[in-house]
Image (tube, grey):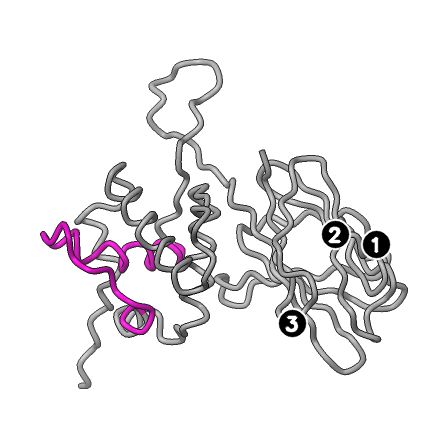
Amino acid sequence: MYSIVVVPPPGTAQDEQFRLAPGERLRFGRSVNADGRDLVIAHEGVPRVAGEITAFPAYWLLSNLSDDQTYVVENPEGAGEHLKVAPGRVEAPVPFEFSRIVLPAAGDLLAFDVWAPRHTFRNAGRDGLSGAATAPAFALDHTKRYFAVLVALCEPRLRGEPHAVLPGVEQLVERLSPVWPGVTRSAVYWNIDYLAVKLRLRPAPHETEVGRRTNGKKETLVSLALRFDLVREDDLVVLAAAPKRSAR
C-alpha cells in the first residue's frame, strides 16, 4: 500500500503520479532515469540528479543532492509554514500532509507537490485499553481545505435533496470564497484530486475524458462521504464565514 504520492509539475512529459510505499525512493532531476521510475524535470537550471524522496507511513524524507542550491518545502495550507533543506542535506524529515517542493533553477522557481494522505490521528476514546488502536477507515482533518471542498460538494444533498445535482467547479468556487478568499478553479480541481487519493477511490475504466473523469470523482466522493457519515449536516459550519465586526 502506498503512503506518499508525488505529483509531477505541470508541463512535464510525465503526467502520471508516483505512488511510493514505505521504504521506497524516488529520485528527481534533469537527467535521471527517463524510464518512468524517476521524476524528470527537464530544465537547464536543475541538476542532473537534484534530489531524492524516501517514503514512510505518515511522512517522508527529502535529500538535497545539489552542490549549491537550497530547496524550500512549503505547506500550502500552513500560512507561510515552510522548511529549508540545505545543499548536500540528506534525509531531512518532512511532516506536512501537503507539501510543495520549490527548486530555484536559473532564475525560475520550479515546484512539484508531495502528498502524504495516510496521516492518522490518535483515538482519544480508547478507554484505557492496552494494545494498538484500530486504524481509522478514513482519516480526514476537518481543518483542511480539502474537507471544506468535500462539504461544499455534499451540501445540496445534506440539505434534504438526496438526488440534487452536484455543484460545478464554478459554483464550488463561489460557495467557498467567503471562507477561502483565494480559492480558484485549479485549487478546487486539486483538492478533488487529492480527496480521490485520500479516500482511495479508483476511477472507472470508462472515465477517460477529463470532464467525465472529474464528474465521476465528484459523484463517487459524495456517495462515499454520505454513506459512511464522513460529512454530516453539522459540518456545514465550515462553510460559514466569521461575522464581520461592525465599525465603531
Looking at the image, which is closer to me, 142 or 212? Answer: 212
Residue furthest right in the image: 67
Q: Which residue is the site of mark 3?
A: 11
Neighbourhood count class around disc 3 (C-alpha, 10 Å): few under 14, some 14–19, many 20 upward = few
Q: Is residue 63 visible?
A: no
The residue furthest left is: 160
Circle 2 crowding by C-alpha within 10 Å: few under 14, some 14–19, many from 20: few
- Distance between the alpha carbons at the discs numbered 3 and 2: 16 Å
Circle 2 sits in a helix, a strand or a loop, which is it?
A: loop
Q: Position of residue 7 (x, y in %)?
A: 61, 57
| Residue drawn at the location 80% of the way across and 57% of the way down | 34
Range drawn in magenta: 144-172
Residue 133: percent from left, percent from top: 44, 22
Residue at mark 2 = 36
Verify whether residue 50 appears in magenta: no
Q: Contact, CB < 8 Å: mark 1 with mark 2?
A: yes
Q: Which mark is residue 33?
A: 1
Residue that lies at the very extreme toward the top in this rendered image: 130
Q: How many marks?
A: 3
Determine the main secondary structure of the stretch shown in magenta. Answer: helix
Say which amino acid is labelled 1: Asn
